[in-house]
Each structure stands twice: as C-alpha cells, then as structure tokens.
Image (spheres, rainbow, N blue to C red):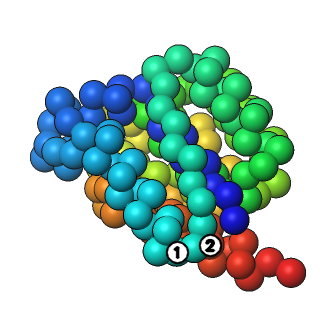
Amino acid sequence: MQVVVLNGANLDVLARRDPAVYGGISLSELETRIYEWASELGCHVRCRQTNHEGEYIDWCHDALDWADGVVVNPGAWTHYSYAIRDALELFQVPIVEVHLSDIEEREEWRRSSVIADLAAKRVLGKGPDGYREALGFIVQQVGAAP
C-alpha cells in the first residue's frame, strides 16, 4: 500500500513556528515519525513539502498513478486554493486532511477549508499524532476495500 503525504506552505519552517500551536517539532522530525508509523502500519509513504502551489499540484497529479491514499496538509492553501482542490478532486482513493492545530478554533479566516468536502476524514488539532491517525485510517479503509 502506497500513501503520499503532501505538506504545503511554511511547513518547512515548522520548528520556528509557535510551539504552542504547532508542537515544536521540525519537518524532518515529523517526517521521521511518519515513516516509522507507516512501517508499523504496514504501508509505504512518500513525504513531500513545498512552498510552491504549482509544484504541490504537480505532485497530486503524479500520485494519481500510484497512491492508494493521500494525506494532505496544504497549510494556508487549505483556506483558498481552488487549484489544489481541483487537483485533489481527481483522486479515487481516500484523502485525509490533517492540520497540526485545530483550525476551527483559530482565527476566522482559518476556519474555512476548500478541501473539507473531499476528505474521507479530517484530523484537526492533534499535533504530529494526527498524521498517525490519518495513516491508520487509510490503512483501514484501503485494507477493507474488496
């Protein structure tokens, strides 16, 4: 089982962001945990991060041909990028939207997600562990498929 984890804008500087909101972990540390969790769950992941919206979309298009599940944290693009939404809409596999913080409890502008209706599951405000929950959900969904 192949899962792509797509992280968006500003997640490359995660360790520099407010630890009370984002958990005080670096992207490298987060990705290490994701790879460990994937191994425990019996799936393979490819983690990617970019600050370039077009590149994010290209990665979505690429994963259409091989991913059995998709974990997305587009960062701020969550709230307004219909281009990313259109790219995600092409998937016929489970998509899980993950945010380290609970975006529904933050500033008004963060409470809107243009991708929420595409997600089979949303994991909000669980810090890095939200990615583990997302992977577990995908493994359960894909493993349960006929």
Question: Residues at badges 1 and 2 in contact (C-beta under 8 Å)?
Answer: yes
Residue on which the image places disc 2: 139
Residue on which the image places disc 1: 41
The reply to whether residue 73 is visible in this rendering is: yes
Residue 105 place in picture, x, y as percent:
30, 49
Viewer-proximal residue among 81 and 10 = 10
Viewer-proximal residue among 39 and 69 = 39
Q: Nearer the viewer, mark 1 or mark 2?
A: 1
Residue in view at x 49 percent, y 25 percent: 50
From the viewer's perspective, is 37 left or right of 143? Answer: left
Identify which amino acid the numbered label 1 is placed on: Leu
Disc 1 packing (10 Å; few <14; some 14–19; many ≥20): some
Image quarter for residue 94?
bottom right
Mark found first going from the N terminus, 1 or 2: 1
Image quarter for residue 60?
top right
From the viewer's perspective, is 60 left or right of 132? Answer: right
